[in-house]
Image (cartoon, rainbow, N blue to C red):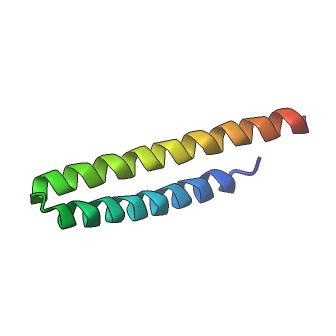
Amino acid sequence: MPEWSLYVALVIAFLLALIVNAQVQLSSTRKGDGLIKMWLKGGLAGGVAMVGFIAVFLVLANLVNALAG
C-alpha cells in the first residue's frame, strides 16, 4: 500500500471528525446545553468518529494487503 494512503485516511478522518463535532455541537446548542458541556460532547463524538474511521481503514488495508500478497 502506498505511503500517501495513510495521509489521505488521516485527512478524511479529520474532516469526518469536524463534521460530527459540528453536528453534535449544533444539536447540543438547540437543547440549551452550556458551553463546556457542548464542547465536551462535540469533542468526544468527533474523537470517536476519527478513531473509528481510522480503525476501519486499517482493517480494510490489512485485508487488501493479505489478499494481494
Task: Establish if 29 lies above or below 57.
Answer: below
Q: Quadrant of residue 29?
A: bottom left
How many marks on residues? 0
Q: Quadrant of residue 9?
A: bottom right
Identify the residue at the far left of this view: 34
Where residue 10 appears, as percent x and y from the top left, is: 54, 54
Q: Quadrant of residue 12?
A: bottom right
31 vs 25, left or right, is left
Q: In this view, does 67 lie to the left or right of 58?
A: right
Q: Which residue is located at x 35 percent, y 49 percent?
A: 45
Foreground of the two, 19 or 63? 19
Outermost residue on the front side: it is 31
Left or right of residue 33, residue 1 in this image: right
Residue at figure coordinates x 41%, y 44% from the top left: 48
Percent across and percent down for residue 38 are 19, 56
The location of residue 44, given as percent across then percent down, is 31, 46
The x, y position of residue 40, in whole percent, is: 21, 49
Q: In which quarter of the image is the C terminus?
A: top right
Residue at 12% of width from left, 53% of height from top?
Answer: 36
Pick the front one: 68 or 27: 27
